Each structure stands twice: as C-alpha cells, then as structure tokens.
Amino acid sequence: MEENLVIVESPAKAKTIQKFLGDGFVVTSCFGHIRDLSKKNNGIDIAKNYEPIYEVPSEKKKLVSELKKLAKQANMVWLASDEDREGEAIAWHLYEALGLKENNTKRIVFHEITKDAILNSIKTPRSIDQNLVNAQQARRILDRLVGFELSPLLWKKIKPSLSAGRVQSVAVRLIVEREREIFDFKSTSSYRIIASFINPDDSKEFKAELSKRFKTKKEALEFLGTCKNANFKISDISTVPSKRTPAAPFTTSTLQQEASRKLGFSVARTMSVAQKLYESGKITYMRTDSLNLSSLAIGAAANEIKSEFGDEYVKTRTFKSKIKGAQEAHEAIRPTYMNSRTISGPAAEQSLYELIWKRTIASQMSDAQIEKTTATILMSNSDEKFLATGEVIKFDGFLRVYIESTDDDKEENQSDFLPKLSKGKNLTVDSIIADERFTNNPPRYTEASLVKKLEELGIGRPSTYAPTISTIQNRGYVVKENRDGYERSATIITLKNDKISEKIKTEKYGYEKGKMFPSDIGMIVNDFLVEYFKDILDYNFTAKVEKEFDEIADGNVEWKKMIDSFYKPFHLKIADTEANSERGRAERMLGLDPKSGKNVYAKYGKFGPVIQIGEKEDEQKPQFASITKGMHIEQITLEDALKLFALPRNLGQYEDLDVIISVGRFGPYVRHGSSFYSLKLKGDELLNIQLNEAIEIIIEGKEKEKKKIIKTFNQDDAPQILNGRFGAYISYKKKNYKIPKKQTPEDLTFEECMKIIESSKK
C-alpha cells in the first residue's frame, strides 16, 4: 500500500512534483476535469432548484477507475489541483467521483512549483473551499443555461449551427461596434509644418514643429510664403525634470498583451507556453489578476538588481490592483528563482520567460530620471510659434532592463536630441516642410487589446480570456487576419533657399496585421441579440454578473438564488422572442440592375453572403453571386455587386489555353485548362485582376506542383510519391500512406509502394 497519493492536473506537473516529494508519495495526473454537466436536459435539473447533473465523459471513465484504485490503496489522498476556482472545482469533482473520505483526504495549493512551496503546502493542508466551488458551478451553469437556450433560438431565427454565449457574445459586440465606427469614419487631412533650423553656436541642425496644423493646402502655402520673409528667434527655453516609473509585474491580461506586442504570440499561445513554464517550476501560477509580489520575491529581486547593476538601481515597491475582485492574496506572474535570468528549452519558452524576468526585475528598480527641454521659437512677422523638444535620460533606472510597449499607432517622433541652445539667439532656416497628414480610423482590436478592453469593462476573468477569444474565432463570428493596405496621394510642400516647391508622394495606409474582423454572420447574430437581449449583451450587466460570482466565492451570496434571479426573466424573454420576433437577417437593397431593371440585394443566404438580382416570386429565378472576402453586406456598392456577375471572367490566353478567374466554395481561383490555382485576392482586387498577374500565379503554381511530385510510375492507375507538409508520402486512389523511415522515397519501386499500401491497409 502506498502511503500518499497526490493528484494534480497535468502529467508535466506530476513529473516535477514527484522529484520534490520522493519516496512515500505517488504523484499522478487527472488530466484536467474528470466530470462535466450531462448533455441530457442541459445537465441541470431546473425543477430541483438548478441542481447540476454531472457525469464522467466516456473518454475519462478508464482514468477515473484507475484513480479510484490508486486512492483505495493509499493511506492519504492529497488533491493538488490549481489554486483558482477552476482548480478548486476539479478537486471537488475528484472528491465526489472517487468516493473519497474526509478523514484521509487533504487539499493543498501552491502558486509556484518549487521544493519549498510543495513541502510547505503539505505542512499546511486545508479542506476544499465550497464557496470557490460554488462560484465555478454558478459560472458553468449560467453559461450552460444561456448557451443552451439562446443557441436553438438562433437556429430558428437566423440559421442552423449557430451558438451564443454570455461572454463570447459581448466580445463579438465589441468587435462589431468597432467595425461600424470604422465604416462611418471619414479621414480628413491637414498639413503638419516641420522646420529644420541651424543652431548658430555649433552649426548643428535640429527640428521644430509648428504648434498648429493647417487644414488646407492654400493655408499651408500662404504660411510658407510668410516664412520666406521671417526672422526666427529662440524666445524661451524651459528644462523640466521628470521621471518614468516601471510597470507593475505581469497579470494574466498584461502578459497576454505584452507577449502579443513584443513576441507576436496569440493569446492562446501565450497561455500554452506559460502553462509549460509553470508546470516545469520556472514561473508562478499564470492565471492571476493580482499585482502582488511576496516579500521573499521582492527581496530576491533586490539582491539580483544590486549584484547586476548596483545599489542605486534598487527601489522596491508593492503594487495594488485597480480591478475589483482581484485575488490580492495570490501573486503576480514572476520567475520562481529571480537569479535565473535565462532558461533552457524551446525558443518560445525562453522568450516568454525572459519577458517575465525583465518585467519582474524592472518593477523593483529605480525610476528613470528624465530631463525634458522645450525651446520656443518665434517668427518676426507672425504670431505662430515653433516648438523644439528633446529628452535627455539623466539616469536610466529600470529602462536599463525593460521598456513597456503600447498598442497605439503613433506618428514617428522627432529626434530626441537637441543641441545646446541659447535664449535670444537668431536662427537660420535650412528648410520648412508642410507635410500632408491624414487622420486614422479607430484601431481594430488585436487579441491582446480585446483582452485589455474586456478587463477594463470587468468582463471575464484570467481563466476566461483565452477560451473566449478562441471560441468567437472557431464559431466563425470573427476572423483574425492581415489585410493589405491601400494607396493614396499626399502633398509635400517645401520651402528651401526662398523657393517653394511641391511634390506628390504615394503612401500606403490601412495595413492591418493580426487584427480582429467581424464576419457578416457575426454581425447578423450580434444585431439580433442586441435587439432582443439587450441585458445579456450590456457591458455593465455582464460585469455585474462577474461581481456576483466574486460574491459567491467570498461566501456572501447563495449561488442558486443568483442563478434563479437571472434565469427566470431570461427564460421568459426566450419564449417571448421565439413567438414575437422577426427573423434575423441582413439584407440591403442596392438599386436596380441596368440590364434587367430588377432589384439588386446584398444578403446573407444559405451558403453565406451573396448578391441577388430579382425576386423569389419572379417567373425567372433570381440570379446569385457570392460576395468575395473582404467585402461586407453593409458596405458593398451596386457597382461592386454587378461586377461580381462578370465572374467567371476570361482574361485571355496563356500557352493556348483560356485563363479564367472565378469564385468557388473555397474562395477565388484562376483556372488554366484543367488546373486550378488559388487567388489570395479580395473585393476590388479580384474584380480588377489583369492577365499578366494571373499568369504569374499560374507559373508559381506550376513550380509548386513540380516540387510536390517526387516520383511517378508508368503503370496504369499507379501510386505517386509526393512531397507534403510533413515530408514524403504515397498517394493512391485518393488516400495517403506513410513511407517507413528506413526507406528512401526516391528509390522506391512500384512493387515496394504497393507493398507499403497493402501492409497499411492491414
């Protein structure tokens, strides 16, 4: 009989903890949740006061049997799942499903996987916190009730296979509302005036910007004309000391944001890599909204800073979270050992660990001391003034280690360097440039900035951000992608040597990288829910529900009463909406088709967004054309819509075969003879593609096909040896077969290929 059985959530964690506990302990894994709500009747007995009906999924039944056996053989069972609500619920489900007894079951928690933390948790066990379990149950049950009642309503009112959720639908609403802000945005231009002056004391050049911008080209030209005859003098120089303070250590949300900005990680990838770092004992628990660091961690950070940079770089701090309901008793995300600046392992783990180490160390370092100088330059013949600004870092402090990134798209900064200037000195002008600038539309959300917004609104918690963002993409309501920008012309007017000249520059704008775009179906579902379920999608209401979960966790609210107060009015609203609401659909009448005189509609059809010419009631059936990627039902014009009916379009011939472009079920393509090549074009790009561009795509496609084929055989109906994503394989009668490692693909004979195929079938 084993003396002690320790059950954790993952095999990686089990392996790390087993090393610390040694003989007398068996550490095993339950692989996350072992029970969930039954699929029958929503898994909730509403008549019995929302009693949950739990079941062990079929894929976990064997594991539960093994855990039961191990538990019976042990003198003491230690439930060591994570320290948050989800972890507490897992411990409770283990207790219930394994039939454990109170006298030989203990609950232990730790926020870092180190020998000291594990041994200390064994010395200080506790019982399962039923309040935390109830908070998790309340969230799970409420989300099940919302999803299971709203989703069938969407199937009836919009289309089958749709889903809705309490938090996911609010996240989609944020993205839809931002997209509509962008639809409504009208860019305006103005002229920014930058002068290059020569300092008389040392002949060094420096730049200064006019304190106002001009709305029109005429105003900019008039001002440059005034500058021709002006004298320029430094009227004032002010030097103001300032400081920069380091950012707090990472929470789940800020780690996701910074890993996105600095490393390009998606939210899901950040959490996956952080989980591995935690389970291997390198960082503290990665699901937290606390900014707190233990006194031990602060001391270790101070020692590391002293030895690496010197005493003057140390300034220890404690941070307090502004988020209501933050678990201050927990810690922020930090390295378990401050003196480990780097780690071994995969590149992604090394990069994320280094980011966490730098952020934690910087949070305990001195402020950066900055000196900001502003020189005011007056004109002799105008009231306008130029300002030259420069910053000098007097003491780098925490900047020696870490600078926080932002999501803002800022204009390029002027040089931070300013020469030594003297008040009252006259300046020589080298040149003055009026540069036409355009206002930018509100930025679309990245995964990380969406997390930031959800957190600001009090929606969701550290454990929910990543699953929410994955869900809205998996449902097809939102797509994360890059979009090529557009080109526009901008005017640059230059005054140099008393002459004014103009030139037109072409600039790119609107390029998007890894941004969140709502799909048409996402917008339709959002509009339906906002119209009929305003409460559910109200930001304040959703945040209020989160606070109620926190109250349940603190033992101040009875969870079934909270569910009841939400569910009864919600259920009545479902019934009322089912009986009295219109079908949710997006449909716009764009105008008349000049050829037939029939109405042209943009609408969401059975297979997605389409253009329709004519009515269902007409004798002649309506014509349909698919809307291409990048076009929205809300934005498409009559002209764009009619162009879609020009597809398929014959561009001409190449190698005596027609080159035809069209749109199929997998998107736009170019057809050359019997070969098809995918087109990564959207909207207008597809409608305006020329023959020479299509030929380039065909040539590129043929080259790829050549590289794909390793070997073919002369026999009828013979297999092919092809190159794939994961190496060489055999393709035969629309099925693929692995080539054994010991065999070289290029050397295989027809007979050997057939043997591999036959043995694979067996």
Image (cartoon, grey):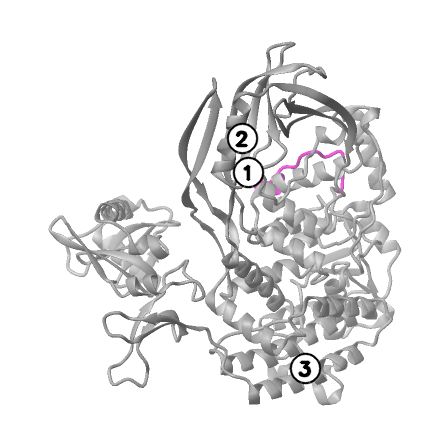
Residue 740 placed where, x, y %? 36, 51
Q: Quadrant of residue 164?
A: bottom right
**157 above or below 281?**
below
Q: Indicate which label's residue lies in the foreground, 2 or 1.
A: 2
Q: What is the secondary structure assignment of the residue under circle 1?
A: loop
Please give the residue where the numbered disc 1 appears in the rendered image. 214
Q: Residue furthest left?
A: 656
Circle 2: residue type: Phe
Residue 347 placed where, x, y %? 57, 39
Q: Of marks 1 and 3, which one's residue comes earlier in the chain?
A: 1
The residue segment tinted magenta is 336-350
Circle 1: residue type: Phe
- Residue 223 numbered mark, or none: 2
349 is within the stretch colored magenta = yes
Looking at the image, which residue is at 86% across and 59% down?
A: 125
Mark 3 and mark 1 in contact (Cβ < 8 Å)? no
Estimate the spatial distance between the alpha carbons at disc 3 and disc 2, rounded to whole Å. 63 Å
Residue 26 placed where, x, y %? 74, 57
Looking at the image, which residue is at 28% across and 71% down?
A: 593
Please give the residue where the numbered disc 3 appears in the rendered image. 570
Looking at the image, which residue is at 56% across and 78% down?
A: 151
Q: What is the secondary structure assignment of the residue under circle 2?
A: helix
Residue 360 placed where, x, y %? 75, 39
Mark 1 and mark 2 in contact (Cβ < 8 Å)? yes
Asked if residue 265 can be seen in this view, the reply is yes
- Residue 625 numbered mark, or none: none
Q: What is the secondary structure assignment of the residue under circle 3?
A: helix
